[in-house]
């Protein structure tokens, strides 16, 4: 469902070809007293993730987790390499087709990006309005999504009046209200206590059990404990696990047959 083939992403000031000079200048250097961050944010990364899987994306701060999720979401374009999502090749995709692909994805942002000038209900309704859903659909789906994350009573509230965990759950409801096939979650438990983090993790596992493919970026190693789920690990923009060398040209975060899962639940896989 998600395939990366030798993908690099260099932001302005980063060197897309830095991989070719690896070792000589890894991690940037100092030119005329100015630090130059030469390495690309994503450096020749290859992997594939099967539909229905729940995969962790780990790595230290600055490793490239958010950048990788932005590439999948089409919010950044790769400097080189090929990305395919649901069989659609991004390099061959006409720009006008990107919104339709994006509608198959739900995004939970690292900083949750709720709009403080409107209610919780209106925040969650946004993807439906952008997706041109009808009024009746919106009136039905938004309360259902808020109910799902335990916030039905807060529909009329301004998000700034909610706790951090509640705001994060509004972000989850917004990501899932249009029933995406793929959920990209960027540090959804950042700044939350352990109990609340586990609640959010359980919520994401529930959605995965209902057939949603989940890619969860986190550096919260406590979140990984007790979950026998596949991981992609980045370090300085490179995929260091699974080991690309041992997996041949393409490192696969693949779950053979059924997705590897927590022992708590049996997955109901969706065909897509
Ligand atoms: N918009 C940008 N412009 C320039 N450089 C960027 C931009 N976004 C990220 N970077 C750089 O790319 C690298 C990877 O950043 P990224 O945000 O993907 O890391 P991360 O693993 O998500 O980190 P964190 O755990 O802190 O969220 C870093 O060196 C960062 O400074
Ligand atoms: Mg990040």
Image (cartoon, rainbow, N blue to C red):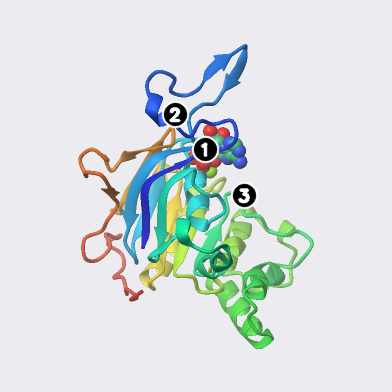
For this rendering, which residue is in front, 222 or 65? 65
Image mark for residue 127: none
Q: Is 200 on the left-hand or right-hand side of 269?
A: right
Q: Is residue 218 above or below residue 104?
A: above
**Residue at the image point whose x is 38% and y is 72% from the top:** 211
Q: Nearer the viewer, mark 1 or mark 3?
A: 1
> CB of residue at label 3: within 8 Å of ligand 2?
no
The x and y percentages for residue 89 are 42, 60
Sequence-first disc among 3 and 2: 2
Q: Report the Cα–Cα distance between label 2 and label 1.
A: 9 Å
Q: Position of residue 24 (x, y in %)?
A: 40, 18
Image location (x, y in percent) of residue 67: 51, 45
Q: In the rendered image, which residue does mark 1 sit on?
A: 10
The residue under the point 45% across, 35% down is: 60
Q: Are the two marked residues, 2 and 1, in contact with CB atoms closer than 8 angstroms?
A: yes
Q: Is residue 184 visible?
A: yes
Q: Which mark is residue 111?
A: 3
């Amino acid at each position: 469902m998600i395939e990366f083939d030798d993908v690099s992403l260099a932001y302005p000031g980063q060197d897309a070809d830095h991989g070719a000079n690896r070792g000589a200048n890894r991690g940037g250097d100092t030119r005329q007293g100015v630090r130059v961050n030469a390495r690309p944010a994503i450096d020749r990364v290859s992997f594939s993730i099967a539909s229905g899987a729940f995969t962790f994306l780990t790595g230290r701060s600055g490793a490239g987790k958010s950048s990788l999720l932005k590439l999948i979401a089409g919010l950044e374009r790769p400097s080189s390499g090929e990305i395919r999502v649901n069989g659609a090749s991004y390099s061959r995709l006409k720009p006008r087709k990107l919104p339709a692909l994006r509608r198959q994805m739900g995004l939970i942002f690292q900083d949750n990006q709720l709009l403080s000038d409107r209610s919780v209900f209106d925040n969650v309704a946004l993807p439906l309005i952008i997706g041109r859903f009808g009024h009746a659909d919106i009136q039905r789906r938004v309360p259902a999504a808020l109910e799902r994350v335990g916030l039905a009573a807060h529909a009329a509230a301004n998000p700034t009046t909610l706790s951090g965990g509640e705001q994060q759950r509004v972000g989850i409801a917004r990501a899932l209200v249009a029933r995406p096939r793929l959920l990209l979650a960027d540090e959804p438990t950042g700044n939350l206590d352990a109990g609340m983090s586990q609640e959010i993790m359980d919520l994401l596992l529930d959605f995965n059990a209902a057939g949603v493919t989940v890619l969860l970026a986190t550096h919260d190693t406590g979140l990984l404990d007790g979950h026998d789920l596949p991981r992609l690990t980045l370090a300085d923009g490179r995929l260091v696990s699974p080991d690309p060398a041992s997996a041949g040209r393409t490192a696969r975060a693949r779950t053979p047959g059924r997705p590897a899962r927590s022992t708590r639940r049996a997955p109901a896989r969706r065909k897509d």
